[in-house]
Image: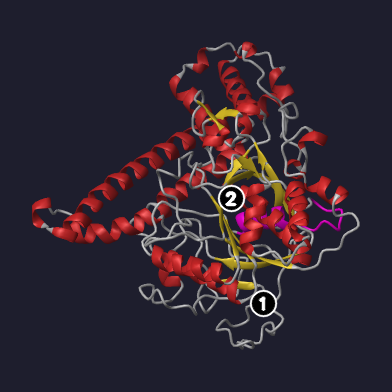
Amino acid sequence: MKIQNVFLLVAIFIQANIFSVNANSVPYIGGDDTLKKAPKNWFNLDKSEDNIYGVSTEKAYRELLKNKKSKKTIIVAIIDSGVDFEHEDLKDNIWTNAKEIKGNGIDDDKNGYIDDIHGWNFIGSKDGKQVDQDNLEITRLYVIYKKKYEGKNESDFKGKKLKDFKFYLKLKKAFEEKYSKAKQQYDNINNFYKVLDAADKKLKKHLDKDTYTAKDVKAIKSEDKDIVKAKIVYLYANGMNITKKDLGEYVKQFEDRIKYNLNVDFDPRHIVGDDYSNVKEKYYGNAKVIGPDAFHGTHVSGIIGASRDNTLGIKGIANNVKFMILRTVPNGDERDKDVANSIIYAVDNGAMIINMSFGKAYSPQKEIVDKAAKYAEKHGVLLIHAAGNDSENNDVVLNYPHRKYKKRGKCKTWIEVGASSWGDNGNFVGSFSNYGKKSVDIFAPGVDIHSTTPGNEYKNASGTSMASPVVAGVAALVWSYYPKLSAKQLKKILLKSSVKFENLEVNLPGSKDKKTKFSELSSTAGMVNAYTALKMAEKMSK
């Protein structure tokens, strides 16, 4: 992930007196086109044919599905930040509510949602306003508990209130540590952005070019100390595949974290206009499902089912799929009430698969999310969820939502997904991916995934957010050809048919030198595979 390179690069410049180095001896770590990269469609490739651990999509279409017809269109609900449903590679695969008349301001199908043509936006207002930024859940909880317990001592409480007070103390410590870390990261990255920006201006002037390459910079011979420094800064950044534009985006990302996500004085919920305390309330929001920032949801959608029948951009995994768009996730943490209502809406309106590429560390209204998950299970809907990107063991550190109910039992149609990489052996697992021998079911490609982005564009992104839709795509593909399978049967097929790597030694996510067996990272020790899943589905269907 580029962000890891950013932190590494910043650390180098902070910890080392790098400007004392002779610029002409700086190692050429990479160049404009010399860095090893994954093929753009690597997640669809096959190990035996392409020497890449993809999910064998193309092989499956060529060998198993060539003379077969898909029997059913699978509706996949995308609970996310919004989706650009006008994207050239997605527009033919967007779910449309046939019972609703577009733009007439009437709830034609009487489902409680007016003009819900392509889905619903649970983080918008009736008059069309949108929530873009929001807090992290830890911030919202900290504000609530601080009002009750700030300035108090343990001796002031007994029983449940004492337990709540102790929780507040832990929460306060966690919040303050998170804020301090975010502030330090922002300061460091912002400072380095200024350094890189200054270097860029010096190099442009020295080379008398508005655009230049790493080879141009490498060829510079100069005794001017400022040019030497600029050369060093640029070559190190370029060697780690970091551009000034990338760095500017990360500066904004961490600025937003402080300004919005961790700001105790920021609360945008009033925009929605619901009674937030009423968890039973369902009918709020609006029909604007693209939202102000649809990058994440658009990228997720393309992985599952970007059109395979055109010559544009990419090919998604499933060839007979429709996306139902549920805008629920802001730039911050999603809220439990919105997640629960999104799941219920998806089930009630015909979704068979729900992709959930989001997560958080706290879930204060988990009961209502559990109730929605039970509703989905009862109606035979498959829930697929990203395990998280904190290099954490989910058996130890909970990532919400998850399949285990607060009271007892667990959702039997839930699949938890970690992220694999296109590298071999030690680099087989995404370094950021959460894992868990008990809590994570399966891994799927989630590093450098090339997919659709708003405005008819295509970009790479990494995360378990990308791995989850790979599994959703394989699930939709299998189900469309074998629609008589139940959700539980389909889950069994996906897990049992996964390609196993029990004894493969990999880097433990989050560690540079600690190794572990891949079998310790999930319950199956497997990576999802379309080819093997289809073969097993065929066998089970006879």
288 sits to left or right of 389 = right
At 74% from the left edge and 35% from the top edge, which residue is drawn?
52
Residue 301 highlighted magenta (yes or no): yes
* Residue 415 pos. (x, y %): 57, 54
Q: Secondary structure at mark 1?
A: loop
Tell me where the magenta segment starts and ends, as one range.
Answer: 294-313
For disc 1, the marked residue is: 117
Quarter where residue 35 is shown: top right
| Residue identifier under label 2 | 465
Amino acid beneath label 1: Ile
Near mark 2 (Cα within 10 A), the count class, few <14, some 14-19 or many ≥20, is many
Q: Secondary structure at mark 2?
A: helix
**Residue 453 appears in the rendering:** no
Q: Quadrant of the C terminus?
A: bottom right
Q: Residue at x 20, y 61 (%)?
A: 148
Q: Quadrant of the N terminus?
A: top right
Say left or right for 330 vs 268: right
**Alpha carbons under labels 2 and 1: distance apart:** 25 Å
* Amino acid type of the residue tagged 2 in the rendering: Ser
Is the residue 228 above or below the residue 209 in the image?
A: above
Identify the residue shown where x is 70% and y is 65%.
85
| Percent position of residue 94, x then y | 72, 68
Which of the marked residues, 2 or 1, is nearer the chain's N terminus?
1
Q: Is residue 436 magenta?
A: no
